[in-house]
Amino acid sequence: MKDKFEQTTKDQIQFFKLKGKVQFGQTDYFKTALLENLDQNARAFVFDLTKVQAIDSTGMGLLVTFLKHVEQDRPNIYLIINDDFIKELFEIAKLDQLFSLQTTEENVIKDIKEKGV
């Protein structure tokens, strides 16, 4: 399972790269990995979902749980999604109102700079 999760930090921005299927039966691993690696001092959090093959409501709930564990008033959380179907799932669930959906890491960095985060 370790090859399904990577964490890096650049300029106080914490990046989480998830791979494979993020769905029922596999989210406990991701939840533990996320919470163990959470840096409360990061100014933004980025989930790279470009290598995610499938996600269900349990996987989406994992991201909401992460949001609740971040001890900031208005955390800046970005999701990098390049799969139109997965992006549509987030929009249907109205999660695009909680997370900023972007298609590339470059777009995320640009948005962070524009917002002065």
Image (cartoon, helix red, strand yellow):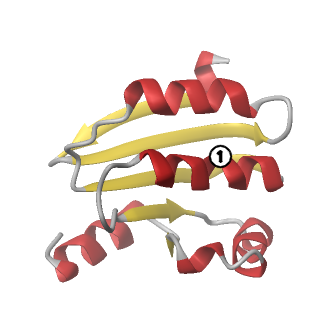
Query: Mark 1 — residue?
Result: 62
Measured as percent of width and height from the top left, residue 89 is found at 78, 71
Q: How many numbered discs sit on the rendered protein?
A: 1
Rendered position, 23 above or below 89: above
As rendered, which of 23 and 75 lies closer to the eye? 75
As rendered, which of 73 and 116 lies closer to the eye? 73
Measured as percent of width and height from the top left, residue 84 is found at 74, 73
Residue occupying image coordinates x 85% and y 29%: 25
Residue 31 visible: yes
Compared across the picture, whether 17 is left or right of 113 comes to right
Check disc 1 and report its element: helix, strand or loop: helix
Residue 55 visible: no
The amino acid beneath tag 1 is Leu
Residue occupying image coordinates x 66% and y 24%: 29
Compared across the picture, whether 3 is left or right of 13 comes to right
Q: In which quarter of the image is the N terminus?
A: top right
Rendered position, 108 above or below 43: below
Compared across the picture, whether 53 is left or right of 43 comes to right
Residue occupying image coordinates x 29% and y 77%: 111
Q: Quadrant of residue 20?
A: top right
